Image (spheres, rainbow, N blue to C red):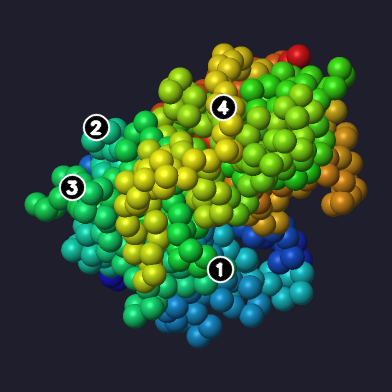
Amino acid sequence: MDYPRRPQYKKNPFSHKNHPGRFRDESKEYLYENGGFSVLFDHIQSDPFAPSSKFRVIIKEYEFQKYPKQFYKNKIRKTAFQDYIVRNTAKTILSEPMQGNSNSFFAPKGGDINIYVPGQEVIENSSVFIRDEKTMEVRMKIKLPGIGRRVNGKLAAKVFTSVLPQLVTASILNSSLDYDTVLQFVESIEDQEYCRSQLDKYGLVGFIRNGAILPRASGNSNLPMEKGKAVGFRSPPSLEVKIPLINSKDPVVGMGIKKGQITLISGGGYHGKSTLLQALKLGCYNYIPGDGREFVCVVHETIAVKSEEGRFVKNVNINTFIKDISETNKTSDFSTLDASGSTSMAASIQEMVEVGAKVLLMDEDNCATNFMIRDYRMQLLISKDDEPITPFLHLARSLIDLKVLDSIILVIGGCGDYLDIADLVLCMEKGFWVSDKTDVAKKICNQHKSLGLHNEQTSYRITNRVRKIMLDDSVSFNRKSVNSKSKDRIFIRGPHNSANMDENDLNNILELSSLDCLVSSSQTKFLIYSIILLSQKRTFVDINSFIDELFARIEQSGLDILGGTMEPDGFVSKVRRFELAMALNRFRLLLVDP
């Protein structure tokens, strides 16, 4: 494409004179005459040491119409296509040197361009936004160049007259895209989402495709294990199902996990039990082709619970699981600044049921033992009257029978008493393949009666209470006072928005490491914006009403509504209602209407 040597603009965009603090004097808009796009600045940094400038590449309507409509003809395809564009742009920025800038998109004196870099999951994000199917915006940041605290006008002009047009041409415009590659990408995501949407029709809560690669390259990597080492998943014949797809003549074949069941995943140590459960935990996401976890699906209402010693709990009814601890500590309205393993698990289950969770996943490796079971000998040592905890073993069946939950999936390798309540027993065998051992487990239970239950089956007590919440109004919540330095932690400045923040004060920290389905720091930004929006409610609000209203607005207008009237943030990704509820429930500045 033939670009002018200088972009057409409303004002002279960059002075070649080197003046300190002149960045904000520059024009906020570039209008490229022949390129089919413009560049709009949302924020211009005050000097080279200030936070990066934010800008949007806006693909004009006549250029946007060149993209085939098959790429974005429905909501899920639009999400996939937007994700493809941001991946393609990020790949170009990170890997390809551009003419006119020998240091690629990274300059030693500034001028580096960056964009949100997605992970293996395809998640709705704000980096690319198709507006009314007429134009498309690609949101990026740039560290404008300088010498010391002075403007480097020549390098700035070079970035925007040479480097940026090359980036747009190489990764964003339709002329840079391979039609078959993009179509394969969006159709894969559409088929995965369709497969998930069909689970209920087939009476399933989960599905794992035959051939899926579940193990990851390492404990700190989300990439698939390298070929030759990983064993593809294979369904037991008794559990194999076929689900038709939209874009394929052949159905996807794999293992279905039925609704209305308690499913046990068992097997020897280091045989893949937790790997299988971890894949199911993240089955709420669609994955890029080649990840290995494509078509590993669970219904959207699936959540995982674990022990979280020390977590904050506010006014949660855990009385079904734990009786009143004392006259002054009533578990029907339980609060604590320092939960035990068992009280944290009880609270987490109740909080998730409150916001609509229907499938519960738990792994014995990270559960509180006394919450999961109390064996016969321990029942003899500690009488029922002296033990406030009702083990989950005694309550699980009633959660299904009363339709509080649709399904429970447990990793159990060390407690055979759970075989008594299991409807399906999966066993991870040597070689990392799965067998259906349900009949074998039933025979074992008939031949070797367990004393563990000891007629202790208990019915779950349903509560219809939905709490009303608000945030402590002594703290000012805004984009400056609430921030994150990592995916797993949000920091809040203290009361009255003091500039000083004690990072050891737990009231100033929202710990998110227990949110297993939080996979990106861009999702943490979603939570930050949601906290700010909740803080604007000056009265108590039903937690479900707040979440429902927020997601309805996002569905209608997109993620930009999170920032209100502020400039768009291109580094935000959507979370589910459950991750938002988990974050709010762990926030030590949360107030609950008594």
Which of marks 3 and 1 precedes in the sequence? Answer: 1
Residue pictured at 86% horizontal, 17% vertical: 327
User: According to the image, label 1 marks what residue?
Assistant: 219
The kind of residue tagged 2 is Lys
591 shown above or below 312? above
User: Mark 4 or 1, which is nearer the eye?
Assistant: 4
Residue 130's place in the image compared with 588, above or below, is below
Return the x and y of residue 168 as percentages of the image width and height.
38, 65
Residue 298 visible in the picture: no
Callout 2 touching callout 4 (CB < 8 Å)? no
**Residue ranking furthest to the bottom:** 102
Point 49% across, 24% down: residue: 398
Q: What's the amino acid at mark 4?
A: Asn
- Crowd band around label 4 with a 10 angstrom C-alpha radius: few (<14), some (14–19), many (20+): few
Q: Secondary structure at mark 1?
A: loop
Q: Secondary structure at mark 4?
A: loop
Badge 2 element? loop
Q: Indicate the quadrant where residue 272 lies.
A: bottom left
Q: Given the image, on which type of amino acid does mark 3 rest?
A: Lys
Q: Is residue 474 visible?
A: yes
Q: In 3D space, how far apart are the residues under numbered discs 4 and 1 (Cα atoms)?
A: 42 Å
Measured from the top left, where is residue 210 in percent x and y? 26, 59
Real-space Cα separation, disc 1 to disc 3, in angstroms: 32 Å
Looking at the rendered structure, the kind of residue marked 1 is Gly
Q: Nearer the viewer, mark 3 or mark 4?
A: 4
Q: Residue at x 52, y 55 (%)?
A: 413
Measured in 3D between alpha carbons, the distance from the residue under mark 3 to the one under mark 4, in whole angstroms, is: 40 Å
Q: Nearer the viewer, residue 335 or 245?
A: 335
Which residue corresponds to mark 2?
A: 201
Q: Residue at x 21, y 47 (%)?
A: 241
Residue receiving disc 4: 455
Mark 2 surroundings: few (<14), some (14-19) or many (≥20) residues within 10 A: few
